Image (cartoon, helix red, strand yellow):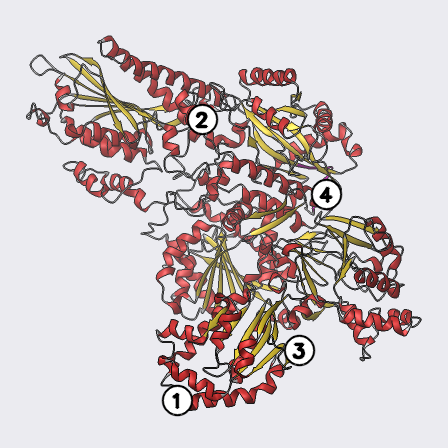
Amino acid sequence: MFLTISTTGTDRRPATDLGFLLHKHPDKAQAFSTSYGTAHVLYPEATAERCTAALLLEVDTVALVRRGKGKGRGGAPDAALAQYVNDRPYAASSLLAVALSSVFSSALHGVCRARPELPRQPRPLRIEVPALPARGGPALVSRLFEPLGWTVTADPVALDTEFPAWGDSRYVRLVLEAGTLTLAEALRHLYVLLPVLDDAKHYWVSSDEVDKLLRAGEGWLPGHPEQKLITSRYLSRRWSLTRRATERLELVRLAEADDTDVEQLDNAVEAETEAEERPAPLAVQRRDAILAELRASGAARVLDLGCGQGQLVQELLRDPSFTEIVGVDVSMRALTIASRRLRLDRMGERQAARVKLLQGSLAYSDKRLKGYDAAVLSEVIEHLDLPRLPALEYAVFDVARPRTVLVTTPNVEYNVRWESLPAGHVRHGDHRFEWTREEFRAWAGKVAARHGYGVDFRPVGPDDPEVGPPTQMAVFTAHPVKEAKAA
Amino acid sequence: MTTTTDTPTPQGRVLPVTDLSLVVLVGASGSGKSTFARRHFTPTEVISSDFCRGLVADDENDQSASRDAFDVLHYIAGKRLAAGRRTVVDATSVQRDARRQLIDLARRYDVLPIAIVLDVPEEVCAERNAARPDRADLPRRVVRRHTRELRASLRHLEREGFRKVHVLRGVEEVERATVVTEKRFNDLTHLTGPFDIVGDVHGCSAELEALLTKLGYADGVHPEGRTAVFVGDLVDRGPDSPGVLRRVMAMVKSGNALCVPGNHENKFGRYLRGRQVQHTHGLAETVEQMAGESEEFRAEVREFVDGLVSHYVLDGGRLVVCHAGLPEKYHGRTSGRVRSHALYGDTTGETDEFGLPVRYPWAEDYRGRAAVVYGHTPVPEATWLNNTICLDTGAVFGGKLTALRWPERELVDVPARKVWYEPVRPLRTEAPGGQDGRPLDLADVHGRRVVETRHAGRVSVREENAAAALEVMSRFAIDPRLLPYLPPTMAPTATSRLDGYLEHPVEAFEEYRQDGVARVVCEEKHMGSRAVALVCRDADAATRRFGVEGPTGSLCTRTGRPFFDDDALTEEILGRLRTAVGEAGLWDRLETDWLLLDAELMPWSLKASGLLRSQYAAVGAASGAVLPDVLAALDGAAARGVEVRDLLDRQRERADAAAAFTRAYRRYCWTTDGLDGVRLAPFQILAVQGRSLAGLPHDEQLALLDRLVAHDATGLLRTTRRLYVDTADPESVRAGVDWWLEMTGRGGEGMVVKPVGALVRGETGRPVQPGIKVRGREYLRIVYGPEYTRPENLTRLRDRHLHHKRSLAIREYALGLEALDRLAGGEPLWRVHEPVFAVLALESEPVDPRL
């Protein structure tokens, strides 16, 4: 990873003052050892008119992979660094920011012992970063640097010139130019904004990182129009779902075995939902509708099949008429988050006795789910491939056979009313299908007939006269006749 | 039940105590129980109530702590008994209620309760207590009450449930008594066989004689000293129960056989003792046949049946034989319910539509270490399930008579001469779902599991791995009915020490040579993704054999996911394959209407485009953007006279390596449109109707596949280039190395070396690696990074820890073979799904993913 810092000057204010500012002599190539490899500082040009300092960090990928890893068993500390094929040696990532702060520490703090007045003087600066990972693309790069007084050139780098169809990579070639900033300011901008743009999965934030951000952001961060984004990205890892050594890595390995990104498999939990400050009103309406139906059915022992992160379980717990609540999900990750959300480990005994979270799958029949009053399948069926629905049908309506079954699913007709949804797109990347009201009714009707249930339908959300409600709900009720016969 | 009160010999009384039992010492305070226990048992066998009082109350004599102390005592005793350890309870136990709790405890853990009574005069007890400072305050009335209660109890001890009662009267008898440990009747762990375990005979004496002959017995004796073990139900229904009894009794008597009772012997025994029994379920036939037998023979039979022990634990605890199966917690135990389970199985109390008892499928839950061999329930085929096997293959119903060779685990059978007795209900597998199958149940796959494989024994799956597999299988995999196989992982060759190489063919050839494999085939490693294709002759065949409506097969990745989001594309590929199979005449030649292919689908970019872009191309793009600038900067500094030569050289190498990396991954990418540009290279036919072809030698496999490829007119199919190598011939090995060098030099991925004859076992009997991959030097850049060939990197990378990967490869291979065998054998879906699921679960084990 690599960047250059250039300045221009005159005989009276020579450009080579850069050497004093950086505390590195222009006629020497110096090497510094850092925690991720060796950093080199050298000057490709150094005249009074123009002086350029280059920072080159040689990353040792083999060491990076082997760091803190169990013997030969691939217990990698985190998925992103555990790759020998890694952009870290080339791209100006958060690791470069770390190197920057240790190699140019005094410059960053605006200290120059030989020429104490120098750091305070603004000078013409040009910074080049040939490969900067920029999540958010050139536009975000400009939004981050321009308010600070930089003239920004950010050209996207093509992924592979032989495959133009692949488009641009996540890297940009960045050139920053300014005449009114001090070097210390420039370095502090880079120190904060390189990791913000990198936004990489591996960047682990320790608790003193907040202080570091406050110090480096002094004087410019508080007034920055993107302050919120900068802060949250810089500190985001702390609350993130980043996989760490202590976490279960089984799914990561299955993804690796099939040349797949783990995000494609472990996507049962949506990335941003944890910070659910403004809950989507539709989700709330859906939960309200489900609660109303459950109360109307008189159910006390309830299954939430496909409970995800446990939002509905949490609602159910608030109502003491639900005496036993079982949340079932196939995703261990979702269950972990649900358990955290419900604070199961801190819940009182009586409360905890009412709730249980189980890993289970509706592709298999499951005897543990027998004998409950009601089962909820909220926004679940559309996550199954159509050919596997009969297995779910058998598992729920034949084996578990609760008296009441509530099924909600999107109404695809309503999609035209979503302004943000491109035509023909499903609402969620993992939706295998979305049904019209007609299709849903046809399926539900057949299921009900086959298994001895009656079925009613309820709209959830505003019932548009033309395209219907955004969510459709089927309420299945087991025929008492059948029960009598079975008994 | 035995009560010993006979007069002491000069040496003192000898008290037999069973090795696994709950021994209850009964005696007043001060009667010398602790001393007695110390003298005759090991310190850890004895739990005293005083000690437990101390544990919970810091005071061994705090009577207010008795309740908690006994809770602790019962808890510890329970743990010991559950673990199969004899336990001696040192408490007064003079009250009936206290003893009842202990008898309940013994029953709960199915061990014998034994009482040893220390009946010592009250004065002696009082004297001893007075001499002990901690008991000096014990009121005399307490000892008096103890003695009174003890005396009142003596007569009832047997009725209370103690199976042995030893009463020692007086100080001297207590002093001089000795305890001897007796083995349980069912404990024959010292017998190691080898055994031939024979299923339910039911009076089929001709079949029995035929089977014994086939097993190598001559007149009931095996020349190699093998022992026959009969699982019971010798009698009833069949033509000659007396003949069978005569043979078996003679073999048992002469020490050539063991026999456990079946429910039919049990009932027959009651009949012989003159009890009222219904002459149903074939007893009438036996009674009739016995009519011609002498009274002497009847008495012999009665004695024989009465003496049968419900089950045996054999061969160091590795083998349990009983009639109707036995869960692990009952192995070697002695109680009424153990006997009842051994004879009748675990009945639910319900009856089925034929009026026969519904049995709880205990074997489904069995996870024990010992193999349980049993009979009782007629099944069409004897198959292992969770380390249990039922050998009743319905000889009397016209099935066959089956024996299991132990420890070889080989099945030997002879067909029934005829249907001797009409079955009430058709023979079917008692396993869940039976042969007709049922939808998969979570209990088939969830949690820690052990899968029995024919080729590598038991393979276990850990809970967390099963959890991950459940997620992928449920959310992403194709319909399990169309997923009868997942490919096993393959181990790389031992790490090369040659300069510049991490992998090289020499090690692979050498490994096989050492394993005694002379002839290997080197198969070109295709540059794509592993794919399993199930091709049916038509939609009808798919419905008939796999129960699906619509699809005519499947094409999935190594984790069971569909290759194409669009089903139409899958069907199009299957259509082309189907045509080629037909043109090549393989449907008829292999006598099948479906076949399962192991193959490689190309290009790799088709499936891995996400990964290619986010990781490989990204690294290429970043290095391409940054390295020219780095070199320019270093050139500038060098021109100024700054000393950067080493750094510059290193960065130039770095740039070369990055360029080589980019070239390497680009070979895996080409654009496709629909099926245009898509290639499929099949390299093994895994299974066809009724047959697993995993054992077909690779040269024959490749010949069949060449035929298939030659008959593909669409350009979809690609042949697999190969070279045969003789591992003992240096010339041939050199040719193999050259072939690999040439192929990888042109950018090829590498090759896989396999023994030509499949299913090869090494000298130890363990299967050898079914294949070893040797990957090309350039290809490995996209595995180990652009600069892995730098000497300092190679040195570190050579430390690869291959062991786990190699063991995993063998286990997954065995599971794959098992899935194919079960598929070919027409077993129900859950049985096929079990090893398939296990392969997926094992893929989530922690193994270096680069291997």
User: Label 2 crowding class (10 Å Cα cut-off): few <14, some 14-19, many 20+?
Assistant: some
Q: Nearer the viewer, mark 4 or mark 2?
A: 4
Residue visible at 32% across and 37% down in the picture: A203
> Does residue B525 appear anywhere in the picture?
no
Q: CA distance from mark 4 to mark 2?
A: 44 Å
Residue B824 got which mark? 4
Residue visible at 61% across and 61% down in the picture: B328
Residue behind mark 2: A166
What segment carries the magenta color? B534-546
Say which amino acid is labelled 1: Pro
Subunit bearing disc 2: A
First reached walking from the N terminus: tag 1 or tag 3: 3
Q: Nearer the viewer, mark 3 or mark 4?
A: 3
Residue visible at 29% across and 12% down in the picture: B645
Residue behind mark 1: B139
Local SS, label 2: helix
Q: Nearer the viewer, residue B727 or B624?
A: B727
Local SS, label 1: loop
Subunit bearing disc 4: B
Q: CA distance from mark 2 to mark 3?
A: 86 Å
Q: Position of residue B277 (x, y in %)?
A: 81, 77
Residue behind mark 3: B1
User: Label 1 crowding class (10 Å Cα cut-off): few <14, some 14-19, many 20+?
Assistant: few
First reached walking from the N terminus: tag 4 or tag 1: 1
Say which amino acid is labelled 4: Ala
Subunit bearing disc 3: B
Say which amino acid is labelled 2: Trp
> Does residue B43 appear anywhere in the picture?
yes
Residue B803 got which mark? none
First reached walking from the N terminus: tag 3 or tag 4: 3
